[in-house]
Every structure is written in C-alpha cells, then in structure tokens.
Amino acid sequence: MYTAQPEADGSNGIRELHQRFREEEVGIFERLGAEVVAIWQRLDDPNTLVWMLAYRDRAHRQEVWQAFVSDPAWLALREKYPVRVSIEAYMMSSTDYSNLK
C-alpha cells in the first residue's frame, strides 16, 4: 500500500501518484517480469493505493525489485513525479482453497 502525503509544497499527492502509475510505473514492473494483479484506491482513505504484484517465487521478486530500483525509466519517472509516500508491504501466498492462485 502506498499512502501519498497530502498535497503541499507544490506536490499533487495522490493525483501525481495515479499519474505515475498510469504513465509508466505499471509498465516498468510488467517489463521486468512482475504480474500487476490489480490496483485499488481505498474508499476510506483516498490518499492510499493498494496494489498487488505477483511473482514466480521470492527469488523472482528480489530480481524484479533489484532491477526496478536502478531502472533508468523508473529513476526518470520518480524525478518527474516526486510523490512522498508511506509504504506498507506484505508478502503473501494463496491458500489451497483460494479462487486466486
């Protein structure tokens, strides 16, 4: 979950975060091999995006994130949209009775 800081100091907060995802962030993750399962905006906290990525395994996750943090397209996008966010991240695996595997 990414919670954008409220708009201040010329930052557009959640609007810039949406634009960053729309413009290229989703595509960067897909290009690097992650599956973008879904992206939601919380109704009870509209400054928060909840998004889910899927990987083959933990090693693949590590590989994708290592490539992401140094990716030139990501670095340019982060500079273009310098949204301050707080991050809450979870690693999960589906249960044997889950419809989503």
Image (tube, grey):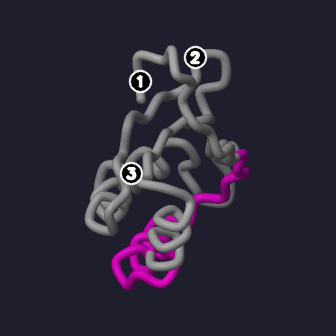
Q: Amino acid at mark 1?
A: Leu
Mark 2 and mark 3: Cα distance apart in space: 18 Å
From the top left corner, tell me how far across and down residue 47 is, in percent: 62, 35
* Residue at x 51% of width, y 62% of height: 61
Q: Which mark's residue is nearer the viewer, 2 or 1?
A: 1
Q: What number is the disc on residue 43?
A: 2
41 w.r.t. 70: above or below = above
Q: Which residue is mark 1?
A: 100
* Residue at x 36% of width, y 61% of height: 29
Q: Which mark's residue is nearer the viewer, 1 or 3?
A: 1
Task: Check whether the beta carbons of the residues at disc 2 and disc 3 lie within 8 A of each other.
Answer: no
Residue toward you, 95 or 100:
95
Q: Relative to 69, is 45 on the left or the right?
A: right
Q: Which residue is mark 3?
A: 21
Disc 1, SS: loop
Q: Which residues are magenta?
A: 68-88
Q: What number is the disc on residue 63?
A: none
Q: Residue furthest front?
A: 96
Q: Amino acid at mark 2?
A: Leu
Quadrant holding the C terminus: top left
47 w.r.t. 54: above or below = above
